[in-house]
Amino acid sequence: MLMPEDCIFCKIAAGEIPVKPIYQDDQLVAFADINPVAPQHVLVIPRKHLSSLAEAGEADKALLGHAMLMLPKIAAQIGLAADGFRIVLNTGKNGGQTVMHLHWHILGGRYMEWPPG
């Protein structure tokens, strides 16, 4: 699979940029966000490069399903199961996506306002 040379999340997934993983398996890596917006802020990235959710196709159903099942387990692992958490998936520039590699944010540790902004 071809990965963009300048994709920071591809480099993290490949182990070229070290992070302290909170969770990892053959499809996903989860680690603390370096610019947290909540007391608990974890990023979950697929090892496969997809620029965004809009790029995902039929071949990605198993990966997306796996991620959706693992997100609450990762949230529970960091202590967010009892009080709740928010999962954020930004897509494209107007959706707030700043790194063009599909990723989920797990946010928690405080009450999440609505609407988000």
Image (cartoon, rainbow, N blue to C red):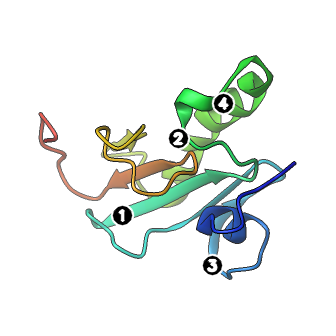
Above or below, 108 relative to 83? below
Residue sitting at x 76%, y 56%? 3
Q: Does label 4 or label 1 sit earlier along the sequence?
A: 1
Which amino acid type is shown beneath numbered disc 1?
A: Gln
Q: Determine the CA span between mark 4 and mark 2.
A: 14 Å
Q: Which mark is residue 9?
A: none
Question: With 37 as the anchor, is 13 left or right in this view?
Answer: right
Say which residue label 4 marks: 64
Say which residue label 1 marks: 40
Residue 2, how many percent across, how many down? 83, 52
Residue sitting at x 52%, y 51%? 100
Q: Badge 4, how many Cα within 10 Å: few under 14, some, many 20+? A: some
Location of the C terminus by quadrant is top left
Q: Determine the CA span between mark 1 and mark 2.
A: 14 Å
Residue at far bottom of view: 18
Q: Secondary structure at mark 2?
A: helix
Which amino acid type is shown beneath numbered disc 4?
A: Leu
Q: Does label 3 or label 4 sit earlier along the sequence?
A: 3
Q: Badge 1, how many Cα within 10 Å: few under 14, some, many 20+? A: some
Q: Does label 1 or label 3 sit earlier along the sequence?
A: 3
Q: Does label 1 or label 2 sit earlier along the sequence?
A: 1
Which amino acid type is shown beneath numbered disc 3?
A: Lys
Q: Quadrant of residue 114?
A: top left
Q: Determine the CA span between mark 3 and mark 2.
A: 19 Å
Above or below, 68 relative to 102? above
Say which residue label 2 marks: 72
Say which residue label 3 marks: 20
Which amino acid type is shown beneath numbered disc 2?
A: Pro
